[in-house]
Image: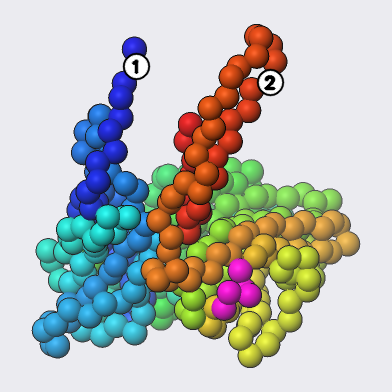
Amino acid sequence: MMRTITVVAEVPGPPGVPFVSDTGRNWVTLSWSKPQPRGSTLMVAPVLAYRVDAWNTEEARWTELGVTPVNSMDVFNLKGEYRFRVTGRNRYGWGEGVTNVNPINIEGDLQMPEFVQDLPGQLKALLGHSVQLKCRVKGIPDPEIKWYRNGMDVSGRKECRWTEKRKGDACYLSCEEVCLEDEGRYRCEAANTLGRVATFARLQRLSEVEAEFGPQFTMRLRDRRVQLGHPVRLTCQIVASPPPQVVWTKDGQPIASTDGHVITSSSDGFHTLEITRATEEDGGEYCVSGKNEHGCLGCRAQLTVDKGLRGYIAPAFVSQVECVTAAAGGSELRLRARVEAYPSIGISW
């Protein structure tokens, strides 16, 4: 059964209501779903970009925050109470915007829980030795903390060999003598009236022979897209014993810390490359590798520097598919067409 799909020359429908997927002291990450299709046989031209606007209660006016080609955006330097509006655009123009109903308070009397130090993604401990999990969290009101092992609550259990402790914003879960059953996935969960967040770690028990090991990625680099002139961070986490020597490269060339590129490392294995103001030359393939006497391991990610909405090119065929006469069965048949677009698009036949 064949089905005909009709592409309608209309602006996009409304996207999903924007919501806060992550937050900090003066910033939020906004996310939203893509516009819903019009039906099984109607298709609207794909969204090229989303514009995000903010309504500050004190200023009582809409302010454009920026344009993004994906359905999320990091918004910085916020203070007060906000509503956010998201509007999609395709080759036919801007569609209908959608605004969140309940205002979001940034750095007010209330603050959603935020982990300022995550649990290590992977932790190795020797059998019979002590181990401690540590993270740091903040929020207003003070978040309630719960610990879980393999999905089971271990907080406040008297028969449990693990003990929990809080000191300021630091949260600890400790065991004096690791045994076989302690291996697994641990989760620290922080919750208050604004929301709930969690951080994770996987504990692996080792024998004395396995105490040293080569580099392993517990969090890999991921592809990123950044608007021209905006900051961006590439982050990974590497665990190894002894600690690895870490090297960053771009398109195969080593990178060193400069005024516009800052490389940092933390004691829990997080390694970050921060570009303070992205230029077109910053686009490319980035690689981070860790090496010690037991091995070497690397991972890669692509950074795309977006030229902004003015640089967008709606998809258009530079050359159409040519008519081809097929030869006898079993011979090769090749169809060609050229499409110009920015950002790059997917092609379906």
Nearer-the-camera pick, 122 or 20: 20
Pointer 2 residue: 332
Sort mark 2 into few (<14), some (14-19) or many (20+) by Cα contacts within 10 Å.
few
Amino acid on which disc 2 is placed: Glu
Real-space CA distance between mark 1 and mark 2, rounded to the nearest whole angstrom: 25 Å
Picture mark count: 2
Q: Are marks 1 and 2 in contact (CB under 8 Å)?
A: no
Sort mark 1 into few (<14), some (14-19) or many (20+) by Cα contacts within 10 Å.
few
* Image spot of residue 251 (x, y percent): 73, 65
Left or right side of 112 for 147: right
In this rendering, the answer to whether 145 lies above or below 326 is below
Nearer-the-camera pick, 262 or 250: 250
Residue 32 visible within the image: no
In this rendering, the answer to whether 21 lies above or below 322 is below
* Secondary structure found at label 2: loop
Q: Does the magenta stretch include residue 281?
A: yes
Q: Kindly give the residue lying farthest to the bottom in the view shown.
A: 259
Pointer 1 residue: 2
In this rendering, the answer to whether 339 lies above or below 303 is above
* Image spot of residue 53 (x, y percent): 24, 73
* Image spot of residue 231 (x, y percent): 50, 78
Magenta range is 279-283
Placement of the N terminus among the 4 image quadrants: top left
